[in-house]
Structure formats: C-alpha cells, structure tokens
Amino acid sequence: MQSVTIRSVCPYDCPDACGLLVTVENGRASSVSGDPDHPVTRGLLCPKMRHYEDTVHSPRRLTTPLRRVGTKGAGEFMPISWECAIQLICSRWKSIVATHGAEAILPYSYAGTMGLVQRNAGHAFFHKIGASRLERTICSPAKDAGWKALMGDTPAMEPAEVAKSDLVILWSINAAATSIHAMRDAQSARRGGARLWAVDTYRTPTCDAVDEMFLIRPGSDGALALGMLHVIEKESLLDKEFISANVLGFDELSARILPDCSPELMSNVCGLPAETIKRMAREYARAKAPFIRLGSGLTRYGNGAMTVRTISCLPAVIGAWTRHGGGIFPGTSTGGAFPLQSLLREDFMSGESRLISMNQLGAALTELDTPAVMSLYVYHSNPAAIAPDQNAVIRGLEREELFTVVHERFLTDTARYADIVLPATTSLEHPDLYRCYGSYHAQRCDAAIPPVGMAKSNWEVFCLLAAGMGWNEPFFRLAANELIELLLVEESPWRNENVTERLRRGEPVMLTSPVPLKNNWLTPSGKIEILNVREGEPLPRLLPTHAENDGYPLRLQPAVSPFALNSSFYEQDDLRSKQTCMELLMNQCDAEARGLHDGQTVTARNGLGAVRFTLRISERVPAGTVVTEGVWWREFITGDRGVNALTSQRLTDGGRGSTLYDVTVEVRGE
Ligand SMILES: Nc1nc2c(c(=O)[nH]1)N[C@H]1C(S)=C(S)[C@@H](COP(=O)(O)OP(=O)(O)OC[C@H]3O[C@@H](n4cnc5c(=O)[nH]c(N)nc54)[C@H](O)[C@@H]3O)O[C@H]1N2
Ligand SMILES: Nc1nc2c(c(=O)[nH]1)N[C@H]1C(S)=C(S)[C@@H](COP(=O)(O)OP(=O)(O)OC[C@H]3O[C@@H](n4cnc5c(=O)[nH]c(N)nc54)[C@H](O)[C@@H]3O)O[C@H]1N2
Ligand code: SF4
Ligand SMILES: [Mo]
C-alpha cells in the first residue's frame, strides 16, 4: 500500500488555522494529526479534527448534483449530471435577470471554509451578474466596531505575550472549546505563576480550568467593566502618567462613572456582589502585567460594540500596555498581508447593487419586494440552521417560486430546501491559502486527495457557472492555484520575498506587521480615544440589551459545543454522541419553580418561536439563565425547530452584527 504524508491546513472558522499532517493511502485520507512544526498547533489538534478523515470520507458526503423531486424541505432528490445542473441554473438565472433584474438573485455564504480563494470564490461571479450583495456580519463585527471606536486601526498585540502575564483573564471566551491553543498558553502562564480568571455567563469547560470564575448576567459585561473603572478611579489605582500621555477623554469618563457607575449600582445589573467587583478592580489594577483575552460571546447582544469598547478601556487606565504581557487581545486582523482585490473583482460591478444583511435573511426572503428575492445561492454556509429567526428563514425557503441552489458537502437543513444541490469538495480536495485570526500566521496548501465522487470546489463551480452564462472573461478560466499566485505576487509590507517563497512551499509562516503592535495608537488623535466625538455615543456608557424588555423571564444562551463547530461536524457519529442530544441546561431553582425534572422534554418559547429540548438540570448555569450547546441538524432533534427559532434578526449597536445570544424565553414541560 502506498502511503504518503501531506501538509494541509484546517479550513474551519477557528482562530488557529492549524497545520495538519494528512496520511494518504491510495488516494484516501487515512488519518490526520497536528503538525508539530506549526508554531501555533505544535502537534495538538482539537477533538473535532482528530478524525477529519471521517468527515472527508463520510458515507453522508454528497457525491453527485441533485435535483429536487419532492416538496421543499422533504429532502427528496434525483441525481443529475453537472452539465444538466449548470444548464438548469443558468437558464433560470437568465430568465430571472430578464424578468426581475439581477438583484433578485441573492448569494449566501459565510465560513464553511476560511481559505481565501474558496471562501471568496463567488464574489467575482455575483459582481458580474449584478446580484444583491450579502453583508457578511453574522459572527462578531461588533467586536471590531467597539475596538475601532476606542483604538482606531491599532493592531492587536502579539498573543504570545500572555506567557509574561501574571493575571490572565479569559473574558467571554470558551477557550477550552473554541481556542484550545490559547487555552494551552494560558495554562502554561498559570504554571509559571500567573493567576487565571474566567468571566462568563455559565460554568463552561474553560471555567473548570481557571483559578477563579466570575459568572455574570448575559449582556452585562459593560456594567462590570464600568464598576471596575469606577473603583480604579475612586481608589487612585490609575496610571496617571500613562493616561496623560496616551489617553483622550479620561476626565470626561470620570465625570460619568463616579456618580453613575458605583460597584453597588453595577452589581444590580451584572449580578456580581459589589465587593467582588471591587476586588476584581483592585487585583486587576495591581497586577504587574494583566492580559485580557477577549472572546466573542459578549459581542452578540444589542450592546455588544459598546461592551467591547468599555472593557478595552481597562488596560488604558492602568497603563497595562507598557508592560510586556499586559494589554487586551481581541484577535488579529492580517487582511493587509493578502489584499483581495484581484479575487473580489469589484471592477466587474456595473453599479452598486443593494446590500442585504445575512442576519436578516428571513426578512429578505419573505418581505423584500423591490425586487423580491427570486433565487438564493448558498455555498459553505447552512442558514436554515445557523441564521437567526429560523421560522422566518424557513418560511422564505418554502416559497415555491424561490429557486434555491445549495453547494454543500452534506445534505444540511438548508440543502433539504434546495431545487438543485451541488456536491462540494472538502479542504483536502482543493488548494487554498489560509491566515489565522488568533495569531499572525499563514499557510498555503495543495489538494491532498482527488475529489470524492463528483464533488467540485467553490471556485470550480463558479467557473462552470460563468461558462454557462456565456461569459468569455478570462478570469473565470484561471485555476485555483493561479488565484493563490495572484494573491502571493501582490507585494505586501507584511511579508518579504523569503516569507512568500516559504508560503509557496506550503510552510507555516509568521507574518510581520508593518507597524509596531504595541504603544502606537492608530487613531486620528494618536491617543486611545475614550472620548470619541465621531461616535454617536461619544463616551462609554451602560447600554441595555435588546431582549431584556421582551417580557420573558429566562435568559437563553445558545452556546457552542466542544464537539461541533456551529452546525459542522454533526456528520461524525462519535462527535455527535458526545453531545448526547439537544439539551437545555437549567438551574435547580428555576426547574423547581416550574415543576420540571431532569431528562423530561420541555418547550422554550418566546415571541418568535417554540423549541423542544431535553431538560438537563445543572448547577453549571446560574438561576435566571438557561443554556443550550451546539447548532443541531434537524434530523437529530426531537422537534422540528433548532435553537435559532428563538433568536432574532435584530442587529448590534455597532457593526450591524447578529444578536444571537440576546434572547429571553419561558420554559414549560409538556
Ligand atoms: N468547539 C467549537 N469551536 C468553535 C466554534 C464552535 O461552535 N465550537 N465556533 C467558532 C466560531 S464561528 C467562533 S466565532 C468562535 C467563538 O469563540 P468564542 O470567542 O469563545 O465565543 P463563544 O463561544 O460564542 O462565546 C464565548 C463565551 O462567552 C460566553 N458568553 C455569552 N454571553 C456572554 C456575556 O454576555 N458575557 C460574558 N462574559 N460571557 C458571555 C459564553 O458562555 C461562552 O463561554 O469559536 C470558533 N470555534
Ligand atoms: N444558535 C447559534 N447560532 C449560531 C452560532 C451559535 O453559536 N449559536 N454561531 C454563529 C457564528 S459565530 C457563525 S460564524 C455562524 C456560522 O455559520 P456557517 O458559516 O454557516 O457555519 P457552519 O454551520 O459551520 O456551516 C458551514 C457549511 O459549509 C459547508 N462547507 C464546508 N466547506 C465547504 C466548501 O469548501 N464548499 C462548500 N460549498 N461548502 C463547504 C459545511 O458542510 C457546512 O454545512 O453561525 C452563527 N449561528
Ligand atoms: S483547533 Fe481550530 S484550527 Fe485547530 S484543528 Fe481544531 S478547529 Fe481546526
Ligand atoms: Mo463565528
């Protein structure tokens, strides 16, 4: 048997973009391990990827194009050829463009693959046809908006500095599940003497591994940070020298927090005792080099951007930035290393078409009429499961006149509603270029195995569609490897020739920021702008969440599972069985107050929908909050709706992000 080991990269939406070593035997991936030479991975893969070969060669893989024969959603299809599929799509699109205009076509994609070429493969095609554009803001744009309001274009610090910190705060990040290498680094700092804290809404696996956890009410981190700022100011724990040289507007903030944000008042909002807020402030301010690793959970609320902005004031007022290991790390942004214009081809647009928020897909499919959306093309995303307000999304997908095409690896909830399903390659079957967003690394890789069945990559499909539309544009005849080369030949201050050559060879490389990562504030004033008059709210302040006035008594938190990634990985039976079933975690007192018992079926409902869960009584969740983990496929749940039937299409205060965690419900037995 011929066996070779090939370097590849994990394609999933995870900060680490791990280096993989794939063993290939007779054209099949037989095992996958972490690349010991990758500077972030260092040989360690998360549980999801340890058997990636079971995803790649899953019996559930789609292997041929399919055409719907049953009702929408029934999942009944017949196989057809690629020629037939492309012909059906292109002739339908030509007629939609002629009758309704090209904006009646809506692409929907997100982060099934993070590879720069395959992820962005559809932009040039949809720009040329003139389709509606999708605003891709489902994840955490409120984090960027909140950071920008305070820090401008200042880049993130080097996360490896955590090793020098003496107090590491994992703030709203379930690192044990979502950022295992950051968790490893935090634990190694702890072994070196640092204290480790977690600030969360329930006891996650991350909380099990820290010295102290602080559980607060969902959406109330702004209050905790304002309370801490109040104590730091009142008890003169400030770094006045740092503030006067580097910070704009601290006096204005003081004038606000001294009367309005005492720990006693903020305690009423976040639920921590005032004494605890005081102690956190003192220990934080007295630490030598406190390091905050800021996750994304707290950004998915109506006040998410303001929350990020408020927390990010903490290292500024105590001057943590000046010390090695001190600061706050929100995630890196290395877009400048590979400018994407040559891929996105905005020059193909003949005018600006309308922009539709991916968080409001339900409304776009059911309410828009100028023109109505007549065709939806979904690739590397599963909106029927992951998008907010599932009932509205499904009402839209059920519209008989909507022509839906889904390009997928599996028959997902979304694919079940398609008129045409196209089989997609996995990352082992196509080349791509990846950059981490939890560190400053990048790597490219080739295909490790041939396509499974008749699967094609995102880029190959758009080339076929361009030909089917009768376009002669040479761009759509390039191979994916040539697109990667277009990105690499473009000069960038982030990488020199040597780095680019190493990328070509498939090595993991470290990108170098063209500006210093610390103590170089890229704001209009050149200072950290606590006061920012360009913002609607010039100063950080307490903002309410959306759902607190919806009138339901329990906060619902749709959290992540360590054994899935959004709705991905449910095809692996072993991983799925580790999650048992779609559970709702509830505190004993809330269960008793409702006469509910462990293991029974319950229904959570609010004004948007009703969802059945198996009740798990758990001391991991505080009273008043209920939690469900994972985004389950419909075929594996008892009811006919997933958790997103309870989440809303409302947007965040900044960045137009999703508010997937800003939810209240009531729960009843059956
Ligand atoms: N295993 C696994 N890994 C993943 C994913 C997955 O689904 N599973 N998803 C991937 C994706 S797309 C992303 S964006 C990242 C996200 O990774 P993270 O940044 O870790 O974000 P979340 O897991 O959404 O939320 C982080 C933590 O915030 C908590 N939280 C929720 N609301 C609040 C709040 O108001 N205040 C505070 N303090 N905490 C709160 C949650 O309980 C959770 O423990 O993970 C990626 N990695
Ligand atoms: N309730 C709840 N909802 C959530 C979240 C949550 O934590 N809770 N998380 C939110 C967040 S942070 C995010 S980022 C979004 C993520 O939402 P999505 O980006 O839609 O993520 P996935 O659910 O992983 O679905 C990705 C799909 O892409 C497919 N795929 C993978 N590679 C390829 C490829 O190369 N080509 C094609 N054509 N398909 C491919 C996979 O099979 C999979 O079905 O979900 C959001 N929704
Ligand atoms: S930790 Fe993240 S990047 Fe690494 S293998 Fe797991 S999902 Fe992929
Ligand atoms: Mo995300």
Image: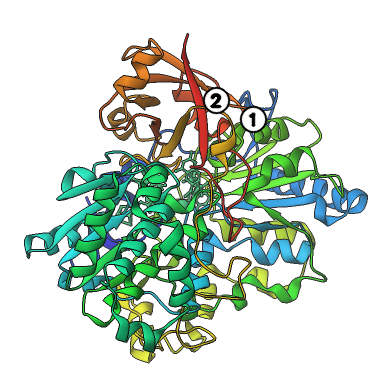
Query: Is residue 406 left or right of 512 when viewed as pictured?
Result: right
Q: Do the residues bearing badges 2 and 1 touch, measured as CB atoms within 8 Å?
A: yes
Q: Is residue 58 above or below residue 165?
A: above
Q: How is the image coloured?
A: rainbow
**Occupied quadrant, residue 341:** bottom right
Badge 2 or badge 1: first in the primary sequence = 1
Identify residue type, mark 1: Asn
Query: Is the residue marked by circle 1 packed among few (<14), some (14-19), or many (20+) residues within 10 Å?
Result: many
Task: Please give the name of the residue rendered at 50% of the width and 83% of the height, measured from the top-left corner.
Answer: 523
Q: Which residue is mark 1?
A: 391
Q: Find the residue positioned furthest to the front.
A: 259
Query: Is the residue marked by circle 2 packed among few (<14), some (14-19), or many (20+) residues within 10 Å?
Result: many
Secondary structure beneath dot 2 equals loop
Q: Which residue is mark 2?
A: 641
Task: Please give the name of the residue rendered at 71% of the width and 43% of the height, measured from the top-left corner.
Answer: 84
Q: In the image, residue 106 lies at what x, y percent? A: 73, 51
Query: Is residue 628 left or right of 21 when viewed as pictured?
Result: right
Query: Is residue 245 left or right of 647 when viewed as pictured?
Result: left
Q: In the image, residue 379 lies at what x, y percent? A: 59, 50
Residue 481: assigned label: none
Q: Is residue 2 at least partly visible in the picture?
A: no
The residue closer to the viewer here, 335 or 327, is 327
Q: Find the residue positioned furthest to the right.
A: 99
Question: Does mark 1's beta carbon lie closer than 8 Å to ligand 2?
Answer: no
Q: Is residue 132 at least partly visible in the picture?
A: yes
Identify residue type, mark 2: Arg
Alpha carbon distance from label 2 to label 1: 8 Å
Q: In the image, residue 604 lies at what x, y percent? A: 50, 22
Task: Please give the name of the residue rendered at 76% of the width and 57% of the height, measured from the top-left corner.
Answer: 132
Q: Is residue 207 above or below residue 120?
A: above
Q: In the image, residue 439 lies at what x, y percent? A: 33, 70
